[in-house]
Image: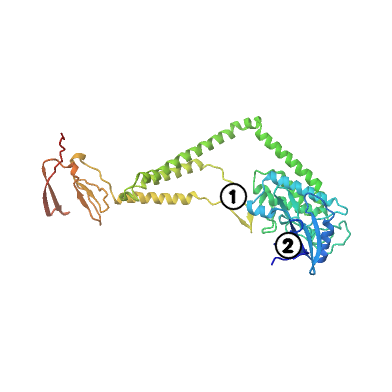
């Protein structure tokens, strides 16, 4: 049976839990809407309720109700449809640069609103898990259980709150709040947006964003470095100052985009970039043509029909040689390509480098080519030393494949060898066929003479 709290909140399921309590999804039966019920310790929940009930900002959740039920305290808040920033990063790895700027400015405006309260509200636990992305792409900051309202030396907070990697060192050593704590957390979040590197996991080192992506603006290192400076004095002293930096970065980003689209920007690299692009297009066209030819070598014989005696060879001869040619062509066209930076990301003190595949492919193709040559050598094809119309007898192996038929030829085989006389090649008159078995020393062992008469059917005229 579904549990109903306070005679109207239908419990739907557990959303999450932590050290401060549990969070449930519920339905308000009176208003027919989804809500979030947060269960926590009495003193923490009361402080959070007192803090949130006076806040009104698009980036903050609304508080609907607060009640006690069966010796438990609950806070009823707005249900936010969407996903957390942590879920976004797990799904996509990183945030595009322009989107990171937009979200960074949104977070700055939320912090600016909180820090502008009297007294200031210090959030203290800014991290991707506490940032919700709504369906329209805007952000909301959730979970104010660790927010510190009485800052500026009042000394009323008696516990420390934060997350390793997103909180400055002094936050764990004192309970008196400072707005630069949130600036530090925002810098850590911006770095993770751009790189995907979680600061709460090994190696706990915040590297330059350019080591992860060289297309990013170089201004990011200055902004993030200032946010995450060791001492509070080295950081931005307000969210407004950080917002101005991000707005300048946004303007410069649009300027770079407009420059890239301008006529001057198109003409300026004409001597260097345009030929390189044309060369890239030519290379791709050549590789596409060669790969298409290789595919046709595999497919066309299958469509036309392949005799069983031609599988795997000689059917695979032409496709394998074509595939080897395509690989060699690829290596020649791309051998001088500039190598990308081997650093993709660093976690657990391991440098992850790219692994090359063409070496293994080359080995497989060379092995296939050698098999083709060996197979062709083991089963020779016919070639006539005489004129075709005079070569009446054909020699075939046990699979029906033609073998070399030439005077003084030596054959080494463990299979059956048979001689065939195609009737279409026989003359009209009678002829004799003599088979003589002679040893290596010239000794004759046996001989047989056969008389063969070829007849052709004549078709008469019908009246």
Residue 344 visible in image: yes
Estimate the x, y position of residue 432 in percent, counting from the top left.
11, 46
Q: Indicate the quadrant containing the N terminus: top left, top right, bottom left or bottom right.
A: bottom right
- Against 332, residue 80 (above or below) is below
Residue 391 visible in image: no
In the image, 76 versus 224, the foreground residue is 76
Residue bearing mark 2? 10
Estimate the x, y position of residue 423 in percent, counting from the top left.
18, 44
| Dot 2: element | strand
Per the model, the C-alpha gap separating discs 2 and 1 is: 53 Å
In the image, 170 versus 140, the foreground residue is 140
Instruction: Please tell me how crowded label 2 is: few (under 14), some (14-19), or many (20+) other residues with Cα within 10 Å.
Output: some
- The first of marks 2 and 1 along the sequence is 2
Residue bearing mark 1? 342
Residue at the image position 64 percent from the left and 49 percent from the top: 212
Residue at the image position 23 percent from the left and 52 percent from the top: 411
In the image, 49 versus 9, the foreground residue is 9
| Dot 1: element | loop
- Numbered disc total: 2
């Amino acid at each position: 049976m579904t549990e109903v709290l306070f005679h109207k909140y239908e419990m739907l399921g557990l959303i999450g839990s932590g050290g401060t309590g549990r969070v449930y999804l519920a339905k308000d039966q009176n208003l027919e809407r989804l809500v979030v019920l947060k269960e926590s310790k009495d003193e923490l929940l009361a402080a959070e309720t007192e803090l949130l009930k006076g806040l009104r900002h698009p980036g903050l959740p609304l508080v609907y109700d607060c009640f006690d039920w069966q010796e438990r305290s609950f806070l009823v808040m707005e249900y936010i449809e969407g996903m957390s920033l942590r879920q976004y990063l797990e799904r996509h790895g990183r945030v595009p640069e322009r989107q990171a700027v937009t979200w960074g400015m949104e977070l700055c405006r939320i912090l600016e609103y909180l820090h502008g309260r009297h007294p200031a509200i210090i959030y203290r636990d800014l991290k991707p898990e506490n940032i919700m992305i709504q369906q329209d792409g805007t952000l909301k900051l959730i979970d104010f259980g660790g927010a510190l309202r009485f800052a500026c030396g009042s000394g009323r907070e008696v516990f420390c709150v934060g997350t390793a990697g997103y909180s400055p060192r002094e936050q764990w050593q004192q309970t008196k709040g400072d707005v630069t704590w949130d600036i530090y957390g925002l810098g850590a979040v911006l770095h993770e947006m751009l790189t995907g590197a979680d600061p709460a996991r090994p190696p706990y080192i915040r590297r330059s964003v350019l080591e992860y992506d060289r297309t990013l603006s170089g201004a990011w290192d200055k902004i993030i470095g200032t946010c995450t400076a060791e001492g509070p004095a080295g950081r931005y002293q307000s969210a407004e100052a950080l917002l101005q930096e991000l707005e300048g970065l946004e303007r410069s980003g649009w300027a770079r985009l407009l420059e890239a689209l301008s006529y001057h920007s198109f003409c300026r690299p004409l001597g260097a970039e345009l030929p390189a692009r044309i060369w890239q297009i030519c290379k791709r066209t050549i590789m596409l043509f060669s790969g298409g030819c290789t595919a046709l070598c595999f497919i066309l014989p299958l469509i036309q029909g392949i005799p069983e005696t031609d599988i795997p060879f000689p059917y695979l001869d032409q496709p394998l040689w074509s595939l080897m040619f395509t690989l060699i062509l690829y290596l020649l066209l791309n051998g001088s390509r500039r190598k990308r930076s081997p650093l993709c990301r660093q976690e657990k003190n391991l440098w992850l480098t790219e692994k090359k595949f063409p070496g293994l492919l080359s080995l497989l193709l060379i092995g296939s080519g050698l098999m083709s040559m060996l197979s062709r050598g083991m089963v020779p094809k016919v070639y006539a030393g005489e004129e075709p119309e005079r070569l009446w007898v054909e020699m075939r192996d046990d699979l029906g494949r033609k073998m070399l038929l030439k005077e003084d030829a030596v054959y080494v085989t463990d299979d059956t060898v048979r001689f065939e006389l195609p009737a279409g090649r026989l003359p009209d008159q009678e002829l004799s066929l003599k088979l003589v078995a002679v040893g290596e020393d010239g000794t004759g062992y046996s001989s047989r003479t056969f008389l063969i008469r070829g007849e052709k059917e004549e078709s008469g005229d019908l009246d």
